[in-house]
Amino acid sequence: MKSRFLPLLLVFAGLFAAEAPTDATFADLAVPEKRLVAQQAILDHSRGFTVASPEAKAWFERVRMAAKSVDNPEAQAALQQVLIFDPSSKPRLPLNPKQPNTYEDPEGTTPETKLAQLERMLDQRRSAKEYPLTVEELVALTKHEDFATAQRANRLLRRISYSAAAPILWERLAKLSQRSQVQEVEDEILRLPVSQATKHLPVEFTGSSLASKAAWVRIVAVRASKNLKVRAGLKSAVLPLLKGPANELTEAAWAAVPRLFAEADRAALTEAAQGLSDRLAPKAKAALEALPGK
């Protein structure tokens, strides 16, 4: 029986909720026990006005007058929030509508402040005529003695001129030994277009540290594995790196095998895999199984 009368109860409840609050509802705003129910009823009714109309104007004028006459601060605040739903009111922006990029930028006086100013202009896509540093000045700053300053210059140079940044980044990678610094330069090289990254890619890497050599191998695997012109030379350069103790370099070399080598190279790779440590042997096995062209 209850299920039979439930739809009728819902219909009557909907009709009752659709009625506009009466004077008694507004009077309940002064009664603490009834205030929350009255505020909710006024709020629910106000949400139904989506377009400006005479009815909406009359209703929100009534709410506005009630907000002025009610004494309770809580009720006043609630009615002020209800007025936000008035479709005829103009929306108020909480922030200054003036965009930040319309403000004048401070002039940089040191290399660091000029680099910061240039980065801000690049982010705002300002005209190149406004840049505080030229490409030549950026190239000079890439040789700064402070690594952070030089690396920031490298990053901004890469954003302005790929062709100017590529050879500098490769040269810088070969000279670094700290893994954290190598990682930053590696990331910048990987952000270069493939054509620029491979154009200046050294087939015989001159870096002396394990970190820089491993970075070179990782970049080779990602950027030059599909370049048939340099692939043969890269294979002969990576093959000797597969032998040796387990370290960052040998692991990077075996990870690059499926990208640089093919089934025709299995004999040479199998020979390089002989006598590897327990740490490298599973990586070599996985690389051999992933060789393309089976």
Image: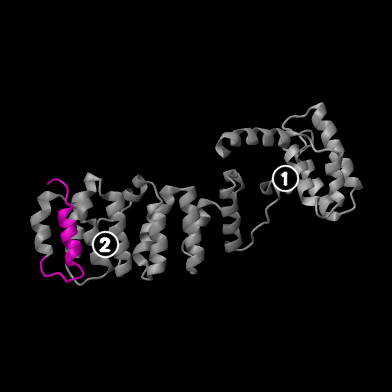
Please give the range of residues in magenta: 274-294
Looking at the image, the residue that sits furthest to the right is 69
- Position of 294 compared to 196: left or right? left
Q: Secondary structure at mark 1?
A: loop
Which residue is rendered at x = 21% and y = 49% of the image?
A: 231
Task: Tell me the crowding category of disc 2: few under 14, some 14 to 19, or many 20 or more residues within 10 angstroms, Cα based.
Answer: many
- Position of 35 compared to 257: left or right? right
Q: Is residue 96 above or below residue 146?
A: above
Give the image location of residue 156, x and y in percent. 50, 54
Which residue is rendered at x = 24% and y = 64% of the image?
A: 251
Q: Secondary structure at mark 2?
A: helix
Q: Which mark is residue 98?
A: 1
Q: Is residue 49 above or below residue 135?
A: above
User: Who is closer to the viewer here, 171 or 259?
Assistant: 259
User: Who is closer to the viewer here, 6 or 232?
Assistant: 6
Which residue is rendered at x = 24% and y = 56% of the image?
A: 256
Q: Picture quarter containing residue 280?
A: bottom left
Asked whether residue 48 is in view, the answer is: no
Q: Earlier in the sequence, mark 2 or mark 1?
A: 1
Q: Which mark is residue 252?
A: 2
Give the image location of residue 178, x and y in percent. 38, 71
Q: Kindly identify the amino acid type of the residue bearing the numbered disc 2.
A: Ala
Which residue is rendered at x = 25% and y = 45% of the image?
A: 227
Which quarter of the figure is the N terminus placed in? top right
